[in-house]
Amino acid sequence: MSTPAKTKAMGPIPPAFTGEDGTLLIGGIGAAALAEEAGGTPLFVYDAAMLSARVASLRVVLPARCDIHYAMKANPFAPLLRHLAPLVDGLDIASSGEMEQALAAGIGPEHISFAGPGKRDAELRAALDHGVTVHLESEGEARRLLAIADGTGVTPRVAVRVNPDFDLKGSGMRMGGGAKPFGVDADRAAPLARAMIDAGCDWRGWHIFAGSQSLDGAAIIAMQAATVALAASLSETVGGAPPLVNLGGGFGIPYFPGDTALDIALVGAALGEAIDRAPAILAESLFALELGRWLVGEAGVYLTRVVDVKQSHGETFVVVDGGLHHQLAASGNFGTVVRRNYPVAVANRFGEVPGERPASIVGCLCTPLDRLADQVALPEIVEGDLIALFMAGAYGASASPARFLGHGPAAEILVTSEGDCLLA
């Protein structure tokens, strides 16, 4: 006899989402209507009003000298970029492809910064031609950029990305501390910056990114204080004030059971204090937070239709027309050590009381890795129901293997504050 399956918890549904007559509303429009507008499922939907509110909530708590940059690797969907462009102060990119998308979204090149190891010569040339700031990741990259610029009459705009000696404690992804492929080790950063200034470059400052996806406000506060101190020390060694200190990101969002939202008011107040007491060399410098998932993650929902409901050894499997090829992170295969459940719901029976038997939501791919929810409590599901997977605004469509097994990409829609649906 099979052992009855035990229900497993899932993460919290963002409180901004509501229902009407049992239907999940996204941007004020019912989920089923959005699926029809897109021509079917699977489908990513992004709520523009939630994006705007997110940026505004951060503006309120940040010190005046701290800008907001959007790390577009989190979600490069063109209508979403166009919506965010006038709301943020800069865009951080990691390829020439993202550069083209950023420029097309209306961001001026002087507000675009290009980070990432392994920039090819053609990418460095494109950044030089457009006037985009290159965040140098090594002395070799600096040498190649200077060689490309030689004889063009164009002055390279550069910042130095620093690999700090510290990391963000408890972060989901540690980007600093120890041997890393990112940035220049802290003890070599100032000499590189000095060399670029002496070579006639337009030095734009420092980029110091220690980690990401943290919900620990105290850890983020400590990291930011250490980052400000490091930027000051490096600048004193260089003998010049940096126009901008990019403090990196680190802000997490509550994907999983037991997660609680980051207290941004506490973090913002502490950052203001750290900037106020910074050494004199940073007195005229601007600062920036580079955020991706925190800005867009909660504003997205992945909608997928139930194809089949089946039983196996006493367990219920809900088979949907989507899967990990669109939502790799939700399947637990995007760097998660222990698989946990994102929040999910039945969109066409939103708010209905769960049934007695838990169900696992699995995708249409022929691999046991394709599991979007594991033994979660949902209303009794039937064929044709619409499943909503939340926290889908970041690292979803563009960070998943859409061509795996030939199923193809999901549609994407941005629902504007006026109720318009913008497709790619």
Image (cartoon, helix red, strand yellow):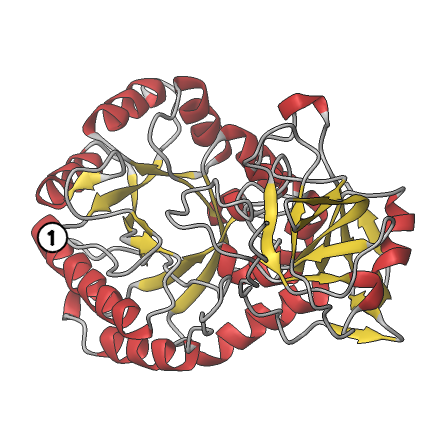
Q: Give the camera-side residue of 389 and 94.
A: 389
Provide residue 114's location: percent of width, then percent of height: 42, 39
Element at label 1: loop
Q: Residues within 10 Å of mark 1 (few under 14, many from 20)?
A: few
Using the rendered image of the protein, determine whether residue 82 is visible from the camera's viewpoint. Answer: yes
Most distant residue in the front direction: 1
Provide residue 365's location: percent of width, then percent of height: 66, 31
Position of 422 relative to 169 (above/below)? above
Position of 406 relative to 174 (above/below)? above
Q: Answer left or right for 350 relative to 105.
A: right
Q: Answer left or right for 204 relative to 91.
A: left
Provide residue 326's location: percent of width, then percent of height: 64, 39
Provide residue 275's location: percent of width, then percent of height: 26, 73
The residue positioned 81% from the left and 54% from the top of the image is 386
The residue positioned 41% from the left and 78% from the top of the image is 263
Q: Answer left or right for 203 relative to 52.
A: left
The residue positioned 48% from the left and 31% from the top of the image is 95
Q: Could you tell me how many numbered marks the image carries? A: 1
Q: In which quadrant is the C terminus drawn? A: top right
The residue positioned 54% from the left and 57% from the top of the image is 341
Q: Answer left or right for 346 relative to 128.
A: right
Q: Quadrant of residue 242?
A: bottom left
Q: Quadrant of residue 61?
A: bottom left
Instruction: Find disc 1 in the rendering and name its residue.
Output: 239
Position of 201 relative to 405 (above/below)? below
Using the rendered image of the protein, determine whether residue 89 is visible from the camera's viewpoint. Answer: no
Q: Give the camera-side residue of 74 and 170.
A: 170
Circle 1: residue type: Gly
Q: Quadrant of residue 262?
A: bottom left
